[in-house]
Image (cartoon, rainbow, N blue to C red):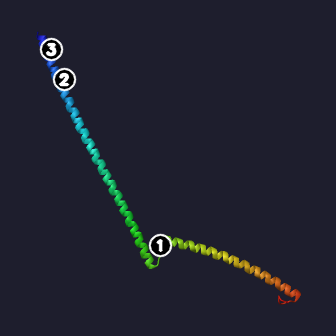
Amino acid sequence: ESTLRAKERDFDELLLMSTDAAHACEAAKAELAKLSALVEEERKARSHELHERRNAVKARQEMNERMEDRERARRDIVLQAQGDLSESDEKRLKQKVVATNLQSHLKSRETDHEKQVVSEYEAAFRKIKESTGVSDVNE
């Protein structure tokens, strides 16, 4: 009978331990759920903050680009007022100068060639004039 009572006490203790373990398990699950929710909430907050910061950086970049465009336009206006050319106008002018120089060089070559042809004709006419004694084309 004492063994039976000891076994019943052991059973009661095991039952109590089982209840405590189940309670501890439930408490751990609740704590886990609570911490998971907290982690998810923090993750969402960080994601939201990151999104806001990216938007702010993008807005700053756009603002800086607009400011640079305005500054560039202002400089172009000032340079035009002073008589200077913008970069694109200067590039176009350089291209025109190169094209004009090339055309001038080609025209000069043409002119030199034509002068040479005319001088050859004049020399030939002089020879004809000397050999025939005719000084006028109409004779």
Marks 3, 1: nearer the viewer:
1
Q: Which kind of residue does numbered mark 3 sit on?
A: Lys
> Residue at 15% across / 14% down in the picture?
7
SS at circle 1: loop
Where is residue 127? Give x, y as percent: 85, 84
Q: Are marks 2 and 3 in contact (CB under 8 Å)?
A: no
**Dot 2: element:** helix
Give the quarter of the image for residue 22: top left
Quarter of the image for the C terminus: give it. bottom right
The residue carrying pointer 3 sits among few (fewer than 14), some (14 to 19) or many (20 or more) residues within 10 Å by Cα, namely: few
Q: Secondary structure at mark 3?
A: helix
| Distance from the alpha carbon under mark 2 to that under mark 3 | 16 Å
- Percent x, y for residue 63? 35, 63
* Disc on the earlier residue, 2 or 3: 3
Q: Is residue 117 left or right of residue 4?
A: right
Task: From the viewer's side, name the closer residue of 20 and 6.
Answer: 20
Residue that mark 3 sits on: 7
Q: Please give the residue where the numbered disc 1 appears in the rendered image.
A: 86
Q: Residue furthest top?
A: 1
User: Taking 114 as reference, is 129 left or right?
Assistant: right
- Disc sitting over residue 18 in the figure: 2
Residue 43 appears in which quarter of the rendering? top left
Does 138 sit above or below residue 50?
Answer: below
